[in-house]
Image: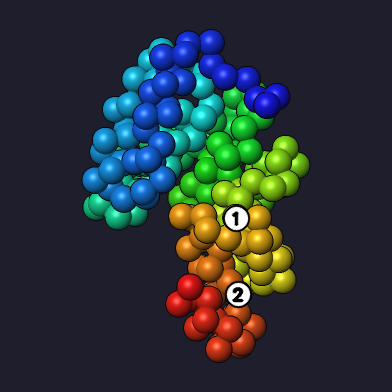
Amino acid sequence: VKRLRPANLNAYDLVLQSLPYVYSNMPAEAATAIPLLEDALKLEPGYSSAHAFLSWCLHARFARGGLRQEDRAAAIRHARAAVTLDNDDATALAVAAQVIAFHERDTAAALQLFARALELSNSNVFALSCNAVILAWMGKTEAAIEGARQALRLSPYDALNFRSHHALAISHFYIQRYEDAVDAAKS
């Protein structure tokens, strides 16, 4: 409720139109979202959420659509733009943190951004699950398991729960709880 919307409501509308495509995390859908987000940024260049979601689309296009270095560089640039703006949007911070962790491999910065996102909204399922994935890959299994389980408790039917299950599978495998890892991977 405290989060400020952009001054230009057309930019806000464009971001809302892009969200189903953004969250698919697939290059074909990202191709639909990218022009919407670029148009939003033309109307409102300082719109941090638009920068974050654009970074996520560029991440999807890089990771699943050809490994083009210009997509990787643009994803990082927009993620960094999202966090340098006055940002009080926990989801935008979490998106930027994930892109920074994946593409810059700056896990320290990513963890700080996740901490800020969860400080703003400790029940943000997207921030909890993305943070859990990064923690799991870092071998911080207890924290990853805790965050993933909290995300699943808060939103048991969320379409993006695969992130939490992914974090659980990695964490359980890492600590040699193989049956739990298999169960999480099947979920």
Residue sitting at the far front: 157
| Residue 82 left/right relative to 148 | left
Colour setting: rainbow
Q: Nearer the viewer, residue 122 or 156?
A: 156
| Residue 1 left/right relative to 166 | right
Answer with the quarter of the image where residue 167 lies. Answer: bottom right
| Residue 146 left/right relative to 33 | right
Is residue 105 visible to the viewer in this orientation of the structure? no
The residue shown at (66%, 51%) is 111
The residue shown at (51%, 68%) is 166
**x, y (%) of residue 131?**
61, 55
Mark 2, Cα crowd under 10 Å, few <14 / some 14-19 / many 20+, is many
Report the quarter where the N terminus lies. top right
Q: Nearer the viewer, residue 106 or 81?
A: 81
The residue shown at (53%, 49%) is 98
Q: Secondary structure at mark 2?
A: helix
Mark 1, Cα crowd under 10 Å, few <14 / some 14-19 / many 20+, is some
Q: Residue flagged by tag 2: what amino acid is it?
A: Ser
Of badges 1 and 2, the one in the foreground is: 1
Q: Earlier in the sequence, mark 1 or mark 2?
A: 1
The residue shown at (33%, 26%) is 36
**Rendered position, 68 above or below 167:** above
**x, y (%) of residue 94?**
58, 44
Residue at image mark 1 = 155
Q: CA distance from mark 1 to mark 2?
A: 20 Å
Residue sitting at the far right: 119
Is residue 126 visible to the viewer in this orientation of the structure? yes
**Rendered position, 166 above or below 178:** above
Residue at image mark 2 = 171
Q: Secondary structure at mark 1?
A: loop
